[in-house]
Image (cartoon, rainbow, N blue to C red):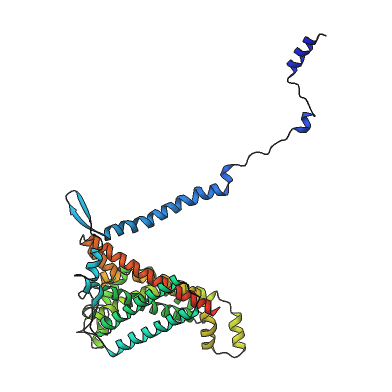
């Protein structure tokens, strides 16, 4: 056979492979992993869109309200006109025509007012000196605490001159603070008391656990109308009780502090179940071995509760108090429906004042009031969280 015919035969059989046996060098690759099973892709695909939406919904209202707070909004034909005025709206609230409305009218502090102001200032000064001597705080943190302490001193002076002062009248800022702190304190004490009672293995405790949750199921508007009827001394459902107590000629909602008390009571009645159910869960989930050991050692129930039970409730209590405090600062439904902010502006909160300004198309002033409330709530929240963290670390 000629060489040409052999080459033709080899080409018909395929390319000639040189070197080692091709069968022994063939490597079968595993199928490529699908990109859809990549955790990084799943995280970017599902988490980032949701995070972007949340950020837009959270940041855009803040930016828009800040623009409104620094502007004057006027209604014109076919829409509205926005004119940048800087801090004019804030200047009007705190230094201008709305100063008395927001900050109140200062009077002469009474003896009790002086005691509150001087005692509170002394405690703040002692705390600041201890912080300086600790040498564990950075200069920026020291400046922040100094500014916060100064603001607290101004707040104490406002309390002494408007709330506890002779001839003084609190403004919407102080009324909001009174609502928030008094309502939160009373709600926590009542919720804790009811939670402790329902863990004492009393008869009918399951029934009362359900009954105590009823106020939380009623809307704030319904609660406001209910207490509006209860405080009516002429045609209300408990008018005979008012007459028996000799208060038939007295209108609770006609007195400034009586109306504020009615708002606080209705707010406490509505939010006590929230505190109750959370604290009840914390009490039932606590470790009982330490308490049983203390009982065997002869410790009293009061000492066990103060030294063992309450420290175990601090994490839950700190969280639920902060949530309740923030919610209390935003109170609007109860004073709006129960008293309509009256008598005068005695029961008007910052949120209600902002709503009234918005309803009157004064959008700039409404946004400025809302930002004022935001600053107050942020300062209170940061101060409260710092205090709780420090106390928790000192106990540990």
State whether residue 4 is above or below residue 83. above
Which quarter of the rendering shows the C terminus? bottom right
State whether residue 182 is above or below residue 86. below
Q: Is residue 279 left or right of residue 65?
A: right
Where's residue 191, x and y in %? Answer: 43, 77
Taking depth in this image into account, of 279 and 345 the one nearest to the observer is 345
Where's residue 327, x and y in %? Answer: 37, 69
Q: Is residue 82 left or right of residue 182?
A: left
Which quarter of the rendering shows the N terminus? top right
> Which residue corresponds to the image point at 54% horizontal and 47% vertical from the top-left?
41
Can you tell which quarter of the image residue 113 is in?
A: bottom left
Residue furthest top in the image: 2
> Which residue corresponds to the image point at 42% horizontal and 84% vertical from the top-left?
126
Total marks shown come to: 0
Taking depth in this image into account, of 73 and 223 the one nearest to the observer is 73
Can you tell which quarter of the image residue 142 is in?
A: bottom left
Where's residue 111, x and y in %? Answer: 29, 90
Residue furthest left in the image: 77
Where's residue 29, x and y in %? Answer: 69, 37
Is residue 159 in sight in this rendering? Answer: yes
Is residue 204 in sight in this rendering? Answer: no
Can you tell which quarter of the image residue 268 is in?
A: bottom left
State whether residue 307 is above or below residue 206. below
Q: Is residue 272 left or right of residue 306?
A: left
């Amino acid at each position: 056979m000629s060489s040409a015919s052999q080459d033709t035969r080899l080409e018909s059989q395929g390319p000639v492979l040189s070197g080692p046996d091709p069968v022994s060098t063939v490597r079968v690759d595993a199928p490529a992993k699908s990109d859809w099973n990549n955790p990084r892709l799943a995280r970017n695909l599902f988490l980032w869109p949701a995070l972007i939406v949340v950020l837009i919904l959270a940041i855009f209202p803040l930016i828009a309200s800040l623009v409104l707070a620094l502007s004057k909004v006027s209604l014109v034909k076919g829409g509205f006109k926005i004119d940048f005025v800087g801090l004019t709206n804030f200047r009007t609230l705190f230094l201008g025509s709305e100063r008395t409305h927001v900050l109140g009218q200062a009077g002469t502090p009474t003896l009790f007012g002086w005691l509150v102001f001087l005692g509170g200032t002394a405690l703040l000064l002692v705390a600041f000196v201890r912080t300086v001597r600790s040498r564990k705080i950075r200069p920026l943190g020291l400046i922040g605490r100094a500014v916060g302490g100064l603001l607290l001193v101004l707040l104490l002076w406002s309390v002494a001159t408007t709330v506890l002062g002779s001839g003084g009248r609190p403004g919407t800022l102080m009324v909001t603070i009174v609502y928030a702190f008094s309502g939160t304190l009373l709600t926590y004490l009542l919720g804790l008391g009811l939670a402790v009672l329902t863990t004492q293995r009393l008869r009918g405790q399951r029934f009362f656990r359900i009954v105590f949750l009823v106020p939380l199921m009623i809307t704030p508007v319904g609660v406001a109308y209910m207490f509006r009827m209860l405080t009516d001394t002429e045609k209300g459902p408990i008018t005979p009780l008012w007459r028996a107590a000799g208060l038939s000629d007295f209108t609770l909602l006609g007195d400034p502090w009586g109306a504020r008390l009615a708002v606080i009571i209705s707010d406490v009645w509505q939010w006590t179940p929230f505190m109750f159910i959370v604290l009840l869960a914390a009490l039932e989930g606590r470790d009982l071995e330490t308490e049983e050991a203390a009982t065997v050692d002869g410790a009293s129930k009061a000492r066990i509760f103060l030294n063992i039970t309450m420290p175990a409730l601090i994490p839950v209590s700190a969280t639920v108090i902060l949530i309740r405090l923030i919610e209390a600062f935003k109170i609007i439904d109860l004073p709006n429906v129960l008293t309509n902010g009256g008598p005068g502006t005695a029961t008007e909160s910052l949120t209600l004042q902002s709503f009234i300004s918005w309803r009157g198309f004064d959008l700039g002033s409404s946004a400025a009031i809302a930002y004022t409330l935001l600053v107050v709530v942020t300062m209170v929240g940061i101060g409260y969280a710092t205090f709780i963290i420090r106390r928790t670390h000192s106990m540990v």
